């Protein structure tokens, strides 16, 4: 029984650590984009390194959590759903890493007039992800509070869509000085920032169903 | 020859194990919270303890319903009941062993012209209704309590499930104990009047004649659990309603409580002292109680959760069981008596419960029985040890393969 209690404790710690990684990843992404817009390359590179570390850590934890659940038959009825949720959360940090790497390799030239648009998109998209983490934690401790926490995720996701649309409209209608290749590149970069909130929404949809099932 | 007659009781015991253990651990195994192997080992051990320690109470009631007063009759009654239970189990219908044996005893009464004690029959029939109702009430109350506790404590889901699993094992052990205490009468009750064995001294404790029979019967139940209960466990666990882990715990606990209440003379006396009518010591159908409990939770959560078609099939099985067992017993007795010329019992004078006319005090029978019991206990212990070692080996292999995986990853 003692071995089992230890396994339970380890698993709880690993799940919490996994959520911490995603949460930190979102924070670092926000700071990384700020650094890029301010032209602080050194700080930006530091943030990329941090995200890479967090992403690989999240991958390790994801595998470990799934292994522990299977080998010790933990959460037999919810195992599949919990694994899928963790997978969706892992996609968020994967997107963060991919987006920052994109900035690093492709170095998109962002006109100063677009900075506030990019900041708003990043802010809204990251907020959607950040609001998801407490909801995911609540699934394990207070599932009846999950749905109310998810409302903010949906709000920020729709905000991201709105500001993304505005930014793209500005790029294509108001910035005639940019050539089409540049416009397309900017649109591509903006979409990838917005993907964070899309992934958060997917995870929120899943979490919402999981919470109903567990509360019933 | 007399030992040979016991085989039908042992077959009934096996059927009971195959069928009724599902009531104790079915919801736990069906919800995947407990592995079948764990469930089978715990259920087997505690059924044996319950049968030997507390099996006498419910046995007396069956004796009053109809005291089968010839070993040939006991054999036929138990055989007919066993066949009915086995057939129902074969079709994965969670049938009641109690109903089967009651039907068979009434069949014997009809054949031999013995009156069926109306009071005892009413007592038994009333538990067929009160058992599931009580099970449903307990289940709903416990379910509400557990849900409230979970919500208030804000316990982590992983930890909560680990507590539930431990709870399922403990409550399952209690359920198996109660099953043994309450239902061993179904298996060996009809043989008790026919045997008068010498006490068996096992150094730590001594087993009376009745306890030796109960031990033998419970070993047959354990064999049934290990060899054939897996299928019915899946039926009880999943088909009527999809059970969550906490529902599984509640179902097992309410079933164990109901069975315990109907086999504990202490509780009965306590109730009497409080000025209430005594609780009858009756072999309650664990199947009915479990299904009552599952329906209770299902209705509490909304009737749509219950699969009423499967429920209907089970209900038909319940009605058919005593009828088929009675008819089968009646015709089997006719054949055994007229074709094989074996005495199947006769009409008892006066009190039906006192008609114990055939008893064996042959010391050789006692000796054979004692060796049989000791051999079976030894075989059981070896089987448990084998299971344990197999499980340990599997876990070690899993751990090693996981360590190897991570080593390669690094």
Image (tube, coloured by chain):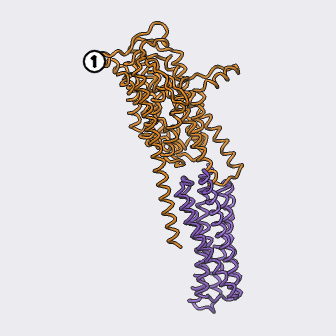
Chain colours: A purple, B orange
Q: Is residue A114 visible?
A: no
Q: Nearer the viewer, residue A167 or B190?
A: B190
Q: Nearer the viewer, residue B41 or B376?
A: B376
Q: Is residue B225 visible?
A: yes
- In the picture as drawn, the residue positioned furthest to the top comes out as B350
Crowd rating for badge 1 (residues with CA inside 10 Å; few <14, some 14–19, many 20+)? few
Percent x, y of residue A162: 65, 74
Taking B125 as reference, is A11 left or right?
right
B129 lies above or below B334: below
Taking B35 as reference, is A205 left or right?
right
In this rendering, the count of numbered labels is: 1
B274 lies above or below A152: above
Percent x, y of residue B361: 43, 17
Percent x, y of residue A42: 68, 87
Q: Name the secondary structure under disc 1.
A: loop
A153 lies above or below B241: below
A40 lies above or below B123: below
Which image quarter: residue B57? Answer: top right
Chain letter, disc 1 residue: B
Say which residue appears at 29% left-offset and 18% top-offset: B340
The N terminus of chain B lies in quadrant? top left
Taking A23 as reference, is B72 left or right?
left
- In the picture as drawn, the residue positioned furthest to the left comes out as B339
Name the residue carrying label 1: B339
Say which residue appears at 41% left-offset and 10% top-offset: B347
Q: Nearer the viewer, residue A197 or B164?
A: B164
């Amino acid at each position: 029984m003692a071995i089992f209690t230890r396994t339970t404790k380890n698993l709880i710690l690993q799940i919490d650590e996994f959520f911490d990684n995603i949460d930190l990843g979102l924070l670092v992404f926000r700071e990384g984009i700020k650094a890029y817009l301010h032209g602080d390359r050194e700080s930006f590179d530091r943030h990329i390194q941090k995200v890479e570390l967090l992403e690989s850590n999240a991958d390790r934890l994801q595998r470990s959590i799934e292994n522990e659940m299977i080998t010790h038959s933990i959460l037999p009825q919810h195992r599949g759903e919990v694994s899928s949720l963790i997978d969706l959360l892992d996609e968020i940090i994967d997107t963060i890493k991919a987006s920052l790497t994109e900035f690093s390799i492709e170095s998109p030239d962002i006109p100063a007039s677009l900075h506030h648009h990019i900041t708003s998109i990043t802010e809204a998209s990251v907020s959607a992800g950040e609001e998801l983490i407490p909801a995911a934690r609540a699934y394990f401790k207070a599932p009846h509070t999950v749905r109310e926490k998810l409302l903010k995720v949906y709000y920020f996701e729709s905000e991201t869509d709105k500001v993304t649309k505005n930014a793209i409209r500005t790029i294509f209608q108001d910035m005639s000085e940019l050539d089409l290749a540049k416009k397309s590149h900017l649109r591509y970069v903006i979409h990838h920032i917005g993907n964070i909130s899309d992934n958060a929404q997917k995870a929120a949809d899943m979490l919402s169903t999981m919470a109903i099932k567990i509360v019933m | 020859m007399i030992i040979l007659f016991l085989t039908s009781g042992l077959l009934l015991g096996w059927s009971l194990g195959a069928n009724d253990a599902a009531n104790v651990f079915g919801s736990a195994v069906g919800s995947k919270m407990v592995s079948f192997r764990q469930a089978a080992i715990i259920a087997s051990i505690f059924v044996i303890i319950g049968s030997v320690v507390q099996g006498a109470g419910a046995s007396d009631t069956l004796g009053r319903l109809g005291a089968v007063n010839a070993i040939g009759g006991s054999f036929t009654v138990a055989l007919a009941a066993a066949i009915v239970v086995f057939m129902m189990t074969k079709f994965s219908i969670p049938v009641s062993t109690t109903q089967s044996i009651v039907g068979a005893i009434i069949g014997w009464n009809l054949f031999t012209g013995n009156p069926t004690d109306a009071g005892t029959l009413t007592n038994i029939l009333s538990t067929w209704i009160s058992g599931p109702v009580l099970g449903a009430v307990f289940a709903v109350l416990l379910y509400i309590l557990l849900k409230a506790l979970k919500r208030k404590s804000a316990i982590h889901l992983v930890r909560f499930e680990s507590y539930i699993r431990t709870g399922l094992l403990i409550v399952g052990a209690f359920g198996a104990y109660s099953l043994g205490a309450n239902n061993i009468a179904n298996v060996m009750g009809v043989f008790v009047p026919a045997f008068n064995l010498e006490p068996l001294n096992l150094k730590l404790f001594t087993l009376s004649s009745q306890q030796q029979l109960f031990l033998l019967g419970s070993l047959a139940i354990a064999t049934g659990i290990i060899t054939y209960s897996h299928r019915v466990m899946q039926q009880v666990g999943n088909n009527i309603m999809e059970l969550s882990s906490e529902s599984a715990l509640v179902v097992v606990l309410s079933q164990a409580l109901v069975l315990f209440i109907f086999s504990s003379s202490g509780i009965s006396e306590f109730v009497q002292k409080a000025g209430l009518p005594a609780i009858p010591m009756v072999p309650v159908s664990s199947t009915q109680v479990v299904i009552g409990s599952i329906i209770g939770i299902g209705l509490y959560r909304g009737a749509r959760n219950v699969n009423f078609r499967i429920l209907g099939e089970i209900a038909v099985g319940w009605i058919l069981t005593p009828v088929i067992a009675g008819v089968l017993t009646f015709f089997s007795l006719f054949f055994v008596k007229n074709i094989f010329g074996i005495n199947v019992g006769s009409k008892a004078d006066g009190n039906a419960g006192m008609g114990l006319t055939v008893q064996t005090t042959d010391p050789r029978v006692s000796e054979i029985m004692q060796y049989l019991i000791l051999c079976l206990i030894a075989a059981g212990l070896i089987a448990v040890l084998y299971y344990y070692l197999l499980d340990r080996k599997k876990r070690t292999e899993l751990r090693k393969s996981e360590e190897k995986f991570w080593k390669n990853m690094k």
